Amino acid sequence: MKNKDLQKFYFMKKLIIRFCCTALIIGISLVMITPFLWMLSASMKTSADVLKLPIKWIPDYFYPDNYISVWNIGGKAKVDYHFGVAYLNSLKIAFINLFGSVLTSTLAGYAFAKIKFRGSNVIFLLYLAAMMIPTQVTLIPRFTLFNSLGMMGGHLPLILPGLVTITGTFLMRQYFMQIPNELKEASFIDGANEFQIWARIMVPVAKPGMASLAMLVFLWNWNNYLDALVFLSDWRQYTIPVALTNFVEESLTEYNLVMAASASALIPVFAVFLAGQRFFVKGLVAGAVKG
Amino acid sequence: MYLKLKLSRQLKTDITGYTFILPNILGMIIFTLFPLLFSLFISFTDWDFTKGLGNWNFNFGANYIEMWKDGWFTSSLFNTILYSLMVVPISIFLALVLAVILESYCFAKVPMKLAMFMPYISNIVAVAIVWVMMYSPWGPFTLMIKALGWETPPAWLGDYNWALIAVTIMSIWSSIGYNILIYSSAIQGLPQDVYEAADVDGASEITKFFKITIPSLSPTTFFLVITTLINSFQVFAPIQIMTRGGPGTSTSVLVYYIYTTGFTFFRMGYASAIAWVLFLLLLIVTLIQWRGQKKWVSYE
């Protein structure tokens, strides 16, 4: 009987601790998303209402005109910010680099993990060392290179270097290392060559790893700011980050428009993230446990 | 006969292997290794981009000497280090505490983890713009500080002494989700028997946190310190959008200074020398990682 009371006491104590901790974490989560909530609410107000205090988190009426002006829907906006063009450019670059780098990483990662060619260890060490090189150090030479090749007007300076990622190669190599060799040896006996094994057996097995890498590459490219700032000079070529900064420089006083533009840049990524959350988290964690 | 067959098989394997890595290695040589060497080369010249390719003179390390008399460079170096020393410990410690609470003492942890992770996946440019407005006199951040009892808060981004701190707060906010995520998955992998033994001994939750959780998470902490440090050394977008290095030189950081020197003033030689200083800093951090892992980290 006494023992049972004690058990009940501990159970209640645990439950109370849990409720308090959950309340605390909910509070912190709310603070963390406050900037987003505020952005959404301000993006649906008139410019006069944004400045009104105290802040009305839920506007009295929803004012969609900000989004219509930012996107220039119907072509009636005072200034055309070409936001749709920037959106398409960002999507184009992100997807080309996503497919390109997942392909090159899967090929090379497989070779480093499963093909015993001479020099593979030395070259892989070189890759490990190259992971330390910050992109800012190579920026000026890349700029010089693309400038002398006459590629500065287009997207090639952002696409070509993005087709190969050293981190991605490393991640895929780690992924293939976990796959047992027996899988490969069995197919060798059946007379398949190395490329057939890669395409028919290894790629299907490595799909979760490839999906994780794909999410990471998409995010890197979508958020790439410094390179885009240096390489792009014309609104037809702008990506979202550059278009956003230009937008702010031209209409900083119209906070509601700026907020609508920022929200337009953020919401689709949240959607993609929520859909592919599982792969994304795996990719990030896999990158972390490299030891 | 047998030897010849074996050799040719190895050769065939070599050819296959190199074919697989060919596109990858070409990309790495053209866009990483060659640029690295080229940037080292021009860092020893006085190259001005407007004079055209090849129009440079060797100045035998004059760039590396000049920078120490350049107030913008020394401020940028100082600010980069100060910024990193603020972001790294605060972001990692908060993440550790939050991850432990989330994993061990919380209901419905998934939506909360997602909420805290949102800033990390957000476009840094959009987020920095939102934070510029958060810091304005009618923004929620300023209002919240006022509500907490500070009647006349500083002008955050416009204040010489507060601008770097304001950028730091935003960076902690945006990086903490990643650190929580990595800590969470590490906590899920911790062996439960140690905690059960501690329960039998009557250890309190606080004791368990300091005596079991922190030591057994040391490899994760070490990894996060290094990656957060490396990312902090490379901070650029928040500075470019929120402050442009100002007021004065109070928020200028190395990458921002490389950018303005190289692409506003086109002093490519000087900018490359500064980039190499950044690279050497990162190299030192990585070497410490390689050596320190054995010394400071306990792998059971």
Image (cartoon, rainbow, N blue to C red):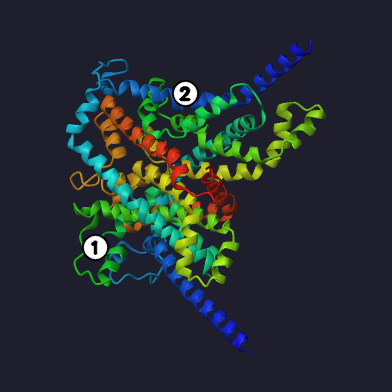
Marks 1 & 2, CB-CB < 8 Å contact: no
Can the viewer see residue A236?
no
Q: Mark 1 lies on which chain?
A: B
Viewer-closest of B148 and A103: B148
Q: In which quarter of the image is residue A263?
A: bottom left
Q: How many marks?
A: 2
Residue B110's place in the image compared with A19, above or below, is: above
Answer yes or no: is residue A7 visible: yes
Q: Earlier in the sequence, mark 1 or mark 2?
A: 2
Q: Which amino acid does label 1 sit on?
A: Pro
Numbered label attached to residue B137: 1
The residue lying furthest to the top in this view is B1
Residue at the (49%, 60%) spot, across then down? B213
The N terminus of chain A: image quadrant: bottom right
- In this view, the residue farthest toward the bottom is A1
Q: Callout 1: few (<14), some (14-19), or many (20+) C-alpha neighbours within 10 Å? A: some
The foreground one among B180 and A42 is B180
Residue A215 rendering spot, x and y as whole percentages: 55, 45
State the image coordinates of residue A16 (x, y, percent, origin top left): 50, 79
Residue B294 placement (x, y as % from top left): 47, 42
* Residue found 49% across the figure and 75% down from its top: A17
The reply to the same-chain question for discs 1 and 2 is yes
Disc 2 marks which amino acid? Ile
- Mark 2 lies on residue: B30
Q: Residue at x 25, y 69 (%)?
A: B146
Left or right, B159 with respect to A205, comes to left
